Amino acid sequence: MSVLRSDARAAVAHDLDDSDRRALHELVDTDPHVNAVLASRLRTVDSLRPARIGGRLLGVSDDGELVAAAFAGGNLLPVAGDEDAWAALAHRVGSAPRACTSIVGRAEAVHAMWRVLYAGWGPARAVRYAQPLLVAEHVPAVPVDPRVRAVRLAELDQYLPAAVAMFTEELGVAPEPTGYRRRVDWLIRSHRAFGIVAADGGIVFKADIGAVSASTCQVQGVWVRPDLRGRGIGTSALAAVFEHALTLAPSVSLYVNDFNVPARRMYARLGMREVATLATVLI
């Protein structure tokens, strides 16, 4: 989204409060798949106060209209804007102690904010420069694995090692144990964690519905046990997850590293199409 200013005024970022709630919702809804995580969070809280939403919400306005925003919590999530707005948001975020461990959003926004934040926050642990954001609106035309089901709370200790393995493989570092266990526990209690549980109790496949908005379910944490990869397990198992996700929202979405060719082929078989390019900076 390009913001064209009619004069030479510099963009200025400011904190948002509950009076900005409607404007923020409207801005988030201009790009619903990209903003799925923030849209999901907004759906579950009754206030924009940091204590309620879990982070600061910042905005840039032009002639009284909100034209860009960012959520600064565990993740830094830019919403809409242009180069000037992203720089203003980054400067305001960077003026406070860093709370986030990553920046995630449209590639151009992430790269612009990181150019400003690098001096104080860098170097990054890793930068995922291009991550296709994929969307599907229909149940995949592939066989659905009947073994896939919601993980039970009693299976937390079996599911957690698979979740940790996925996280470590993807990000190159193990998650913080206590916080990550709480996150996995919440996913299971919310009926958003899915898997294939082997007869011995081990996890063969896992995937989570990490965010649910009015527009989409965002699938995250897809993982197949390494010794079973290349057998089509992930495709048929994800088809089952997608089938459930499409009962919760009109589309299912996820993003993938551009260099992960096997995963991209699998998502193509599931009928997904690219709608945007995201980027992630891991700090």
Image (tube, rainbow, N blue to C red):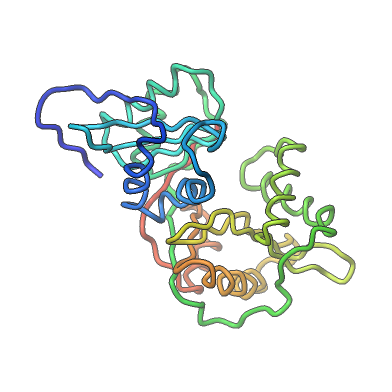
Point out the image quarter for the N terminus. Answer: top left
Q: Closest to the observer: 103 or 248?
A: 248
Indicate the quadrant where residue 215 lies: bottom left
Residue 159: x %, y % from top left: 78, 56
Q: Is residue 93 left or right of residue 97?
A: left
Give the residue displayed 55% in from the left and 68% down from the top. Answer: 245
Quarter occupied by residue 52: top right
Direction from residue 9 to residue 106 in the image, left or right: right
Q: Position of residue 188 (x, y in %)?
A: 72, 57
Could you say where residue 133 lies in the image, as x and y percent from the top left? 43, 56
Residue sitting at x 18%, y 32%: 63
Q: Is residue 225 above or below residue 75?
A: below
* Nearer the observer, 265 or 245: 245
Q: 24 or 1, which is in the foreground?
A: 24
Residue closest to the far right: 200
Answer above or below: position of 182 versus 112: below
Number of numbered callouts drawn = 0
- Could you say where residue 100 lies in the image, as x and y percent from the top left? 55, 30
Question: 81 left or right of 40?
Answer: left
Say which quadrant the C terminus sits in.
Answer: top right
Q: Which quadrant of the structure image shows residue 203? A: bottom right
